[in-house]
Image (cartoon, grey):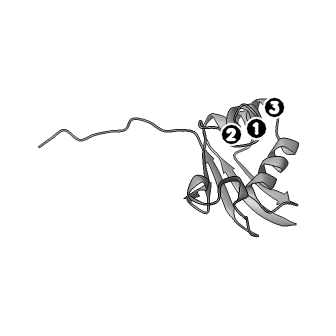
Amino acid sequence: MIQVSIEIYGPFADLAGVNKAVLELEDATVRGLIAEMKRRWNRSFIEAVMDEEGKEFGLAVLVLVNSQPVYHLEGMDTILAQGDKIVLLPPMAGGYHLPPV
């Protein structure tokens, strides 16, 4: 069993009712992380961050493992280690642009 920290931002934190937590995982993969999230948090949160089948993260959430997007790693099979930091972010758009000089 390992412990990982998770930080949840934006509306996802509102749905989870928490923005930081330490999770104990029996299965030290992103798939195991999802299983623990399903045990710990309410259905509204899970539906917001998961795809329609509830087996993978949906397109409406950016998942980082130690600052790396999970889709740049091994996806659901990404192996997690003791102390890893997972971040869930809502998609971002827009921004401030300086006018041309």
What separation in Å lies between label 1 and label 2 (alpha carbons)? Answer: 6 Å
Q: Residue 83: image x %, image y %? A: 73, 68
What separation in Å lies between label 3 and label 1 (alpha carbons)? Answer: 12 Å
Q: Amino acid at mark 3?
A: Arg
* Quadrant occupied by the C terminus: top left
| Disc marking residue 17 | 1
From the image, tell me which residue sits under label 2: 13
Q: Amino acid at mark 2?
A: Ala
- Of 44 and 70, nearer the camera is 70
Say which of marks 2 and 3 sits in front.
3
* Residue 23 falls left or right of residue 57: right
Q: Residue furthest bottom?
A: 82
In the image, residue 64 above or below residue 46? below
Taking the spot 19% from the left edge, 38% from the top edge, the residue there is: 99
From the image, tell me which residue sits under label 3: 43
| Precedes in sequence: disc 3 or disc 1 | 1
Categorize mark 1 by other alpha carbons within 10 Å: few (<14), some (14-19), many (20+): few
